[in-house]
């Protein structure tokens, strides 16, 4: 048996990195805490460097100032008496009293010690203990000469008892308390950073969890589930985009179901007509003559047109039909379409007029634009019992416009919103009689969408309707500039 076959699956968890086994909230909290700890440690390191370099220099300067001041006071008294008496060295005893923890020694020019604070403090009866003054050094003592009339008559040494760095007990206590304060500040900073990280992670994870739950609900078939997020931050905008996607999925699913129902209904009517007519002829109820065969033929042609229209619409929606990009003179293109439909419109008892602004050009597929315009004209003829149809080409707000107006049955505002839906008809009965399939306007919308344009519709019941195609105008200079950038 192979090693892999006997290996417990649970052992795989221990091979994973520790952080990958933690939740996002835990990882964020830990990251904030580590950042706070690192920042505090760096601060402590910097402060420690300052203590070692500058604070010791500061305390040494203080001790040197004590030595200088004491030497100056002794020099003033020595100038009056001419000898090192008890009154002359009294400033040294005063310094020892004021600055607790320091030692002071005064020596004459020949090296004779005339005052030593350690000897004075160590007297026990009449027995004198030897001096506790440290050996002369650069770091452990501060020294100042006693100068009288530019002549050094002695010197003053100052040191800190029990310290080789001239740090008094008060200074060392201050340093220790500072380190303790920094340690507590580090602990508090880590706790606060962890709390802030936890709250931050929760605020970030909450909307993500809502999107996850919404996606899971949609995967289980609840297409109405939404995140409901609102706001201007990136996560909220992601949630809003997710909701828009979910709305689009739900809408497409509704359209798909409705399309299935509508296609079944549309196919059922001609198929039933064909079936009933053929069965009647087979049973001898109807004679097999030209009239009844013509009925069957018309329904077959209707089925053929329906399937062809559905195929065109499907190709447009799936982008399987390639889009040719050519510079199209809209006026010339539409004029040819109007000329071709003139006899068709006149046979319906209507008039057809055409107006166009010169020089209106777009970048697009002329065949698709021709098909969209032809569908609008055919739709206008179908829904215009009398009057006329007007086709106009112009410009509006940087867009080329192709407007087809009629004097037909018109549209209400509700009908204008549904007019581009598949198989929808404002007058279903008359539409079928005139051969309408309810797909032509859906094809128009898909064509214009592929050209990055839009379709507008205005109408009033009993007055007429106007369908307007908006296509981006072609700017030759902008196109040349873009071509130079690509090259």
Image: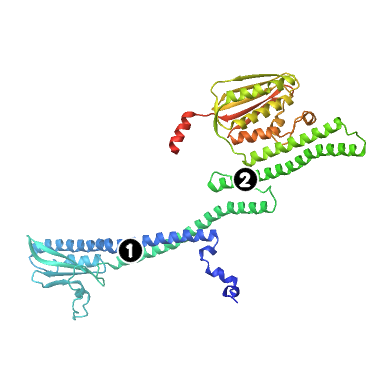
Compared across the picture, whether 305 is left or right of 176 comes to right
- Position in image of residue 275 (x %, y %): 85, 39
* Numbered label attached to residue 245: 2
Of marks 2 and 1, the one in the foreground: 2
Residue 157: which quarter of the image?
bottom left
Pointer 1: residues within 10 angstroms few (<14), some, or many (20+)?
Answer: some
Residue at (8% x, 61% y) in the render: 148
Q: Quadrant of the C terminus?
A: top left
Total tally of numbered discs in the picture: 2
Residue placed most toward the observer, 197 or 226 = 226
Visible in this render: residue 188? no
Compared across the picture, whether 445 is left or right of 42 comes to right
- Position in image of residue 144 (x %, y %): 15, 64
Q: Is residue 201 above or below residue 101?
A: above
Q: Secondary structure at mark 2?
A: helix
Residue 252: which quarter of the image?
top right
Residue at (51% x, 63% y) in the render: 19
Compared across the picture, whether 42 is left or right of 168 comes to right
- Position in image of residue 191 (x %, y %): 48, 61
- Position in image of residue 226 (x %, y %): 65, 48
Compared across the picture, whether 478 is left or right of 172 comes to right
Q: CA distance from mark 2 to mark 1?
A: 58 Å
* Numbered label attached to residue 48: 1
Residue at (31% x, 67% y) in the render: 172
For this orientation, the residue located farthest to the front is: 289
Q: Cβ–Cβ below 8 Å for labels 2 and 1? A: no
Q: Secondary structure at mark 1?
A: helix
Q: Earlier in the sequence, mark 2 or mark 1?
A: 1
Residue placed most toward the observer, 28 or 33 = 28
Residue at (65% x, 28% y) in the render: 373
């Amino acid at each position: 048996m192979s090693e892999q076959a006997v290996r417990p699956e649970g052992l795989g968890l221990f091979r994973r990195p520790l952080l990958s086994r933690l939740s996002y909230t835990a990882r964020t909290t830990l990251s904030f805490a580590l950042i706070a700890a690192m920042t505090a440690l760096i601060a402590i390191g910097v402060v420690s460097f300052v203590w070692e370099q500058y604070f010791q220099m500061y305390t040494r300067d203080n001790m040197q100032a004590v030595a200088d001041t004491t030497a100056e006071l002794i020099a003033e008294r020595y100038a009056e008496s001419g000898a090192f008496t008890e009154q002359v060295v009294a400033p040294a005893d005063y310094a020892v009293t004021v600055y607790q923890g320091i030692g002071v020694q005064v020596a004459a020019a020949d090296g004779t010690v005339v005052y030593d604070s350690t000897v004075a403090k160590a007297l026990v009866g009449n027995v004198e203990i030897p001096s506790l003054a440290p050996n002369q050094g650069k770091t452990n003592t501060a020294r100042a000469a006693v100068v009288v009339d530019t002549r050094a008559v002695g010197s003053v040494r100052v040191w800190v008892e029990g310290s080789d760095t001239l740090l008094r007990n008060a200074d060392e206590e201050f340093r220790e308390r500072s380190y303790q304060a920094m340690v507590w500040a580090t602990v508090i900073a880590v706790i606060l950073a962890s709390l802030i990280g936890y709250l931050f992670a929760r605020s970030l994870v909450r909307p993500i969890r809502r999107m996850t739950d919404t996606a899971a609900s949609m995967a289980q078939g609840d297409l109405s589930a939404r995140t409901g997020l609102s706001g201007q931050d990136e996560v909220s905008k992601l949630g809003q985009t997710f909701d828009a996607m979910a709305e689009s999925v739900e809408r497409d699913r509704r359209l798909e179901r409705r399309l299935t129902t509508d296609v079944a209904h549309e196919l059922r009517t001609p198929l039933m007509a064909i079936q009933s007519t053929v069965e009647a002829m087979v049973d001898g109820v109807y004679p097999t003559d030209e009239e009844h065969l013509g009925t069957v033929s018309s329904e077959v042609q209707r089925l053929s047109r329906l399937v062809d229209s559905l195929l065109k619409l499907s190709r447009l929606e799936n982008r399987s039909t390639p889009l040719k990009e050519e510079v199209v003179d809209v006026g010339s293109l539409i004029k040819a379409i109007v000329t071709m439909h003139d006899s068709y419109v006149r046979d319906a008892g209507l008039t057809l007029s055409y107006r166009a602004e010169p020089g209106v050009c777009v970048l697009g597929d002329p065949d698709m634009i021709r098909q969209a315009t032809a569908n609008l004209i055919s739709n206008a003829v179908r829904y215009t019992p009398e009057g006329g149809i007007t086709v106009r080409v112009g410009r509006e707000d940087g867009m080329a416009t192709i407007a087809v107006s009629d004097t037909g049955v018109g549209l209400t505002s509700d009908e204008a919103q549904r007019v581009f839906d598949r198989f929808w008809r404002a007058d279903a009965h008359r539409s079928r009689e005139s051969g309408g399939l309810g797909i032509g306007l859906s094809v128009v919308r898909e064509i214009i969408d592929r050209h990055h344009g839009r379709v507008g519709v205005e109408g009033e019941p009993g007055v007429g309707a106007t369908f307007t195609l908006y296509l981006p105008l072609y700017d030759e200079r902008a196109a040349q500039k873009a071509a130079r950038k690509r090259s």
